[in-house]
Image: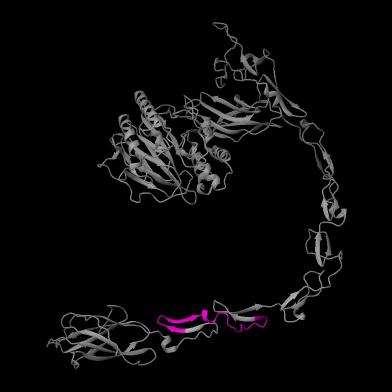
Amino acid sequence: MMERTLGRIAACAAFVLLALAGTAHAQLRNVNLTFRPPGDARVVGFHVYVGAASQSYGDYRDDINFIPPVDSNGVASYALTGIEQFQNVYISLKSYDATGKESGFSNELVVAAQQQCLVNGCNDNNPCTTDTCTATGCVFDPAPRAGSTCDDGNAMTFSDMCQPSGTCAGTLGQCNADADCPAPADSCAGPQSCVNHKCVAGSSPKPDETTCSDGKTATKYDVCRSGVCRGFACGNDAQCSDGQACDGVERCVNNACVAGTPMVCSDGNVCNGTETCVGSACVPGTAMQCPTDDGPCFDAFCDPTLGCRVTMHPDGESCLTQMSGADGTCAAGVCVATPTQPPASPDPMPPTNDPNMTPTDPNNPRDPRPPVTPSQTACSGSFAAATDVHQELGQDSETTRTIVWNAPLNPMGSVLQYRQESDGFWRSLRAVPKKVNGCDATYSVTLQNLSASARYRYRVSGAATTGRDFSDGFALQPGPATPRSKFKVAFVAGNGLQQSAPSAEADAVLDSIKKGHFPLVLGGGGYALSAEAIANGAASNTQQAIDMWKDQASVVTSNSIFAPVLGDTEVASSVHQEVAADYAEYLTLTDPNAANPSYSYDFGSTHFVAVNAPTVGNIHPSTTAGAATLAWLDADLAAARAKGVRWIVIYMHADLFSSEKTDASVQTPRNAIAPMLMKYGVNLVLSGEGNSFERTRPLKGASLAPSTMLPDLQEVTTANDGVIFMRSGSGGHVAFKPWLRAAQPTWSAVRDNTHPVYLQLTLSDKQLEVTAYGLDEKGKKVLVDDLKIF
């Protein structure tokens, strides 16, 4: 008899033990209950409760309406019959008195389920397994029988044996006799024989050059070669002819068709178009149409060899100006209006009447004449499309804009055309080469008198043999009309190359910024990320990566002013091979190679400060560079506040507040910059070092601590509450990492490392709003954060 002690019970109940009895039938069994009756004279009997789950009983199952005899140990016994055999059964007792009042439950005991295989045995009728009944049920183990012989029931297999998976499998044979082998697939081979259950080629193939068919329409000459039917392109010249004389007479050489010599239809004159051969005969081309918008001092003509060209009228020849139609004379290709009254003093360079023409002589700002270099004549055969189109930030962002691009130094020159979006008429301006390198030139045009309430389109020309080759149209959005006017600015950092796996959202972020029609875009560093691009196979060298990024970013730089700061990936180091000069064309307000290439500018109601801080060392007071930058910043902020600007926004690459850093690592630069941020009332500091988004609560004081009076998630604040720091370094780069500090710091209000993010700043004299937009996995724009400052 097997017993299990289960513990004491409450007063008037019983201490119950269990023993298994004989099986009643296939699915039921009996058990012996042993229990110690309580020494309470009121007890007249016991109720036995049985359930299929712990502490889950219905009414009692058996009524022991007497006190069974007890043995010398004070233990009574009771036979419980008809218990389920193949599932767990839970049993507990209650004692009761003469009135039927019951005690509490005794301890619960469990009659464990028995394995069914102990009754029925185990047999899966598989000769490749060993069948065993275990405590958890039947186990059919193929391991002991693996490799033993068996019969898979397939007459076409041989060497049948048990597999490790428990299946019986043999080697599939192709045949048992020669008659089982089909006719050979290749008609050039002899009949097949059955060798070791496999069909092999016969030994009597057809003679070489016997005609056959390989079943492919592309081969016109099929013959037997060494018992194999091989298809060739041809066996004679007629099989190679395409019936067209324009591409010459085709011939068959070594069973391969050789192209003929095409007919030559060109007459050597590009002006009457390109002659072509059609239907075995030469037909004339379309005559070249040369451009006629080169101005009154140029004539277009077609050179039979070089194509469209322009010739410049001699200096002093009479002309009519394009803008006003006034009388004038040609000077270096420009029609200069004749003065209506004598100048106050002799001046050999009369002023231009065209306000959109960029002066080219720094010593004489009235000189309208484009420079004519001796190399232009030598570059008459230089053709290429315009590239690297971008807008430059000038002193008057509201009404003027300078457009810069690269194009060939061809005598026909390069032209900018512009119009308002609501107007279909293009106005043309001849561009000025501002830098020449061989037959390549950098051109520029400054547009003036722009309307702040209008949007513009512009395009620029390259050179082609057919004349001017215009680029796609780009957008131009003037700045705010007054310091009180509302305008938008974007901030993006950590973009990377779209072709690089960690920057899969780069194009989508830039395209979203383009659609925002921002007149100004701030760059926070992390542009080409060349080291990463090379490691991912997106670029083969640093220069290629930078060129690819500039082409990728042109959707922003050609449609907006791009005002960047340099990040740690844009300064030369042992890891990153990019240098500041690689981005010089976007840094027109500073020298990128200067000791402190920080710069600032006013745009509408806001003073923007681009701080050169690729790392915190550049703003650390203990470094030479850091001390110089902090001194410059203090002077710049003082001047800005003296002018009465409404908002001050600082942006740089290095982060001063980030859950990806420890506070201790940046505390010294924080303490150094805090006094001037507080003194001059800086409203917002943007950075783009890490691959995530995070915004601080308003921070104040010498240590930039959060105000305890403000809620954690502050969405509306005032300038008196403190300065806001916001980092957004995942503008396309999506190699997200867990936070260094899983617990959000007390200064942190919002953070996100699951989206590529860029910022939109909407500014007026009344409010500064910063909206963080992210892209979801489908490229749809989602709101990550929104902050209003009054």
Quadrant of res 410: top right
Q: Nearer the viewer, residue 22 or 305?
A: 22
726, above or below 349, in the image: below
Residue drawn at point x = 54 percent, y = 84 percent: 126
734, above or below 160, in the image: above
- In the rendering, at what x and y percent does residue 745 appear? 32, 46
Does residue 150 show up? yes
Q: Is residue 142 magenta?
A: yes
- Residue 621 placement, left or right of 361: left
Q: Which colour scheme appears in the figure?
A: one colour
- Residue 4 placement, left or right of 730: left
Residue drawn at point x = 47 percent, y = 86 percent: 122
Q: Quadrant of the N terminus?
A: bottom left
Marker count (numbered): 0
- Residue 69 placement, left or right of 331: left
Which stretch appears magenta? 132-158
Q: Nearer the viewer, residue 425 or 450?
A: 450
Q: Nearer the viewer, residue 648 or 706?
A: 706
- In the rendering, at what x and y percent does residue 725 appear? 36, 39
Quadrant of res 655: top left
Q: Nearer the viewer, residue 184 or 56?
A: 184
Q: Is residue 746 magenta?
A: no
Q: Quadrant of the C terminus?
A: top left
- In the rendering, at what x and y percent does residue 785 appear? 38, 44
Does residue 763 show up? no
